Amino acid sequence: MEIGHIGLYVTDFDRMLAFYQQVFGFAVTYIARNDKRSIVFLTADPTSHHQLVLVTGRPDADQHLVNQVSFRLKTLAELRRVYKHLVDMGVGGLEPLTHGIAWSVYFPDPDGNRVEAYVDTPWYITQPHRTTIDLLASEDDIYALTEKLCRDAPGFKTMPVWSEDVAREIQPV
C-alpha cells in the first residue's frame, strides 16, 4: 500500500501552483478555473494522473489541518538539487537533516504548510531521530557521516534486514 495523493486547500492558487511546479517540477494534468473554485491536478510521475491536488477555498484562519506533505525522491543528488533550488528561491525556514532512515529537508510552502522532500537511506535506526546535516556537502561526506551515525545508534540494521523483520509482522487484510 502507498499514499496515492494529497489534496490541499490553498489561499493563493497561482502562487501555490508556481511554487510546487518550481520546487518539484510537477506537470499539470488537469486544471479548471472559475469564479467559485479553481482546482489543479499535478504529477511528477508519468504513470500517475495526480500526486498533488490544489483547490481554492482554504479558510482565512491560520489553520493547518495537515501535519506535513512529504515527497520521496529517488536519489540524494535529486534531494540536494531541490535543497539548492529552495536556497536560490530564498525560501526561509529550511531544515536539512537526517533521520538515519532518510535524508530530508523540511520547509514551508507559500501557505505555510510543512513540506518534506526526502530520500531513503540504506540504514535503519530506532525512531524518532533528527540530526542536522549540510546538504551542500559532498555526497560522499553525507553518506559517510550518516552511516557512522547509524552504526553508532540504537537499533541499527541495514534496510533489507529491517524490511524482512517488518514483513513478518504485517498481517494480511
Image (cartoon, grey):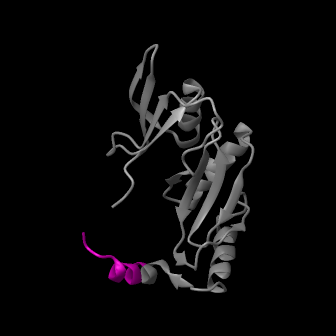
Which residue appears farthest toward the top when viewing the image?
Answer: 35
Q: Give coordinates of residue 41: x percent, y percent.
A: 40, 33
Side of 129 where 10 appears, left or right: left
Residue 121's image quarter? Answer: bottom right
The image shows a total of numbered marks equal to 0
Q: Main secondary structure of the magenta part?
A: helix
Vertical relation: 38 (above or below) 123: above
Camera-nearest residue between 141 and 54: 54
Side of 67 where 146 appears, left or right: right
Vertical relation: 55 (above or below) 5: above
- Asked if the stretch drawn in magenta spans residue 46, the answer is no
Residue depicted at 61% across the width and 59% down the height:
104
Residue segment shown in magenta: 163-173
Residue depicted at 56% across the width and 58% down the height:
118
Which residue appears farthest toward the left when viewing the image?
Answer: 173
Camera-nearest residue between 64 and 170: 64
Residue 40's image quarter? Answer: top left
Q: Give coordinates of residue 79: x percent, y percent.
A: 59, 55
Q: Give coordinates of residue 101: x percent, y percent.
A: 56, 71
Quarter of the image with the N terminus is bottom left
Camera-nearest residue between 86 and 64: 64
Q: Give coordinates of residue 165: x percent, y percent.
A: 40, 84
Camera-nearest residue between 77 and 151: 151
Residue depicted at 45% across the width and 23% down the height:
38
Vertical relation: 169 (above or below) 23: below
Residue 45's image quarter? Answer: top left
Side of 47 where 90 appears, left or right: right
- Asked if the stretch drawn in magenta spans residue 164, the answer is yes
